[in-house]
């Protein structure tokens, strides 16, 4: 099956290098020199990776036959697609391919249904899970262990332990109001204590 592994960004330098937005947990495998990738749009490819290096936290790639800045700029926005065996799994048991996750049921720790995992979004800051709710709305969930502690492929489910407000914004507003009230109460108690101390000092 086909798997999007990167999106081409800006040209870098004048020799055809491009920055890429990585969308795979295995860039050293999927984007290694010699890898042949199909593209979206198809007219931009196929592209063969000639070389790659990390510069200032970004992955830079060069492709066979793309030798100048104009050629690199023409590829901007192109998706790079690798062929992946559907039965293949990552070496790390804590990692998953996107196609393994899409379509899984999303539930809370107590088994309460949340929705269906519709997509995995690979953003520069972090990965997000797009969850389609029963009412047709979308909820974006940070793909971190504290919020997504369990992925059970055998039972086809993703377990969430979301903070207040992630799934229900109204709860976040209530929690914020409670925190504000608590802060005001603490401030009032502190002022009262200061006033009592001042009164005691005056009486002395």
Image: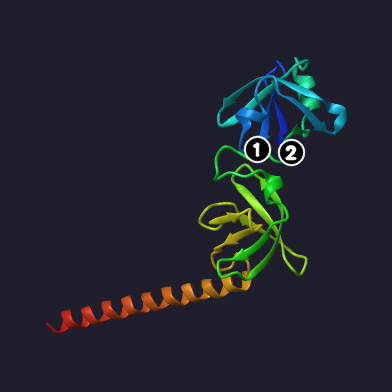
- When the figure is inspected, residue 144 is found, relative to residue 75, above or below; the finding is below
Disc 1: which residue:
24
**At x 70% / y 41%, what residue is drawn?**
87
Disc 2 and disc 1 in contact, CB within 8 angstroms: yes
- The image shows residue 61 at horizontal and vertical percentages of 67, 24
Helix, strand or loop at label 2? It is strand
What distance separates the C-alpha of mark 2 from that of mark 1?
9 Å
Tell me: residue 183, above or below residue 88.
Answer: below
Q: Tell me the number on the disc at residue 3.
A: 2
The residue closer to the viewer here, 198 or 139, is: 139
Q: Give 37 or 153, whichever is nearer the viewer.
A: 153
- Against 21, residue 176 (above or below) is below
> Which x, y percent locates residue 139?
68, 61
Q: Which mark is residue 137?
A: none
Q: Tell me which label, 2 or 1, sits earlier in the chain.
A: 2
| Image side of residue 144 versus residue 79, left or right | left
Q: Position of residue 14 (x, y in %)?
A: 70, 17
Residue located 49% across and 76% down the image:
178
Most distant residue in the left direction: 204
> x, y percentage for residue 68?
75, 16
- Quarter of the rendering occupied by the C terminus: bottom left
Q: What crowding class fits label 1: few (fewer than 14 Cα within 10 Å), some (14-19), or many (20 or more)?
A: some
Instruction: Report which quarter residue 133 is drawn in.
Output: bottom right
Q: Would you identify the image quadrant in which residue 34 lies? A: top right
Q: Using a 10 Å C-alpha cutoff, classify the residue at mark 2 as few (fewer than 14 neighbours), some (14 to 19) or many (20 or more).
A: some
């Amino acid at each position: 099956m086909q798997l999007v592994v990167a999106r081409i960004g800006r040209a870098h330098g004048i020799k055809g290098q491009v920055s890429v937005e990585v969308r795979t947990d295995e860039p050293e495998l999927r984007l290694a020199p010699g890898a042949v990738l199909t593209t979206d749009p198809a007219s931009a490819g196929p592209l063969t990776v000639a070389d790659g290096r990390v510069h200032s936290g970004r992955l830079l790639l060069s492709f066979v036959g793309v030798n100048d800045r104009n050629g690199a700029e023409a590829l901007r926005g192109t998706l790079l697609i690798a062929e992946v065996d559907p039965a293949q799994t990552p070496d790390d048991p804590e990692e998953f391919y996107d196609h393994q996750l899409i379509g899984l049921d999303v539930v809370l720790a107590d088994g309460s249904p949340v929705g269906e995992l519709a997509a995995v979004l690979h953003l520069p800051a972090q990965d997000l899970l797009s969850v389609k709710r029963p009412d047709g709305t979308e909820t974006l969930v940070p793909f971190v262990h504290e919020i997504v502690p369990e992925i059970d492929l055998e039972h086809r489910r993703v377990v969430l332990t979301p903070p207040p407000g992630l799934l229900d914004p109204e709860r976040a507003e209530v929690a914020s109001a409670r925190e504000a009230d608590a802060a005001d109460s603490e401030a009032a108690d502190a002022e009262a204590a200061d006033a009592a101390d001042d009164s005691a000092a005056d009486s002395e």
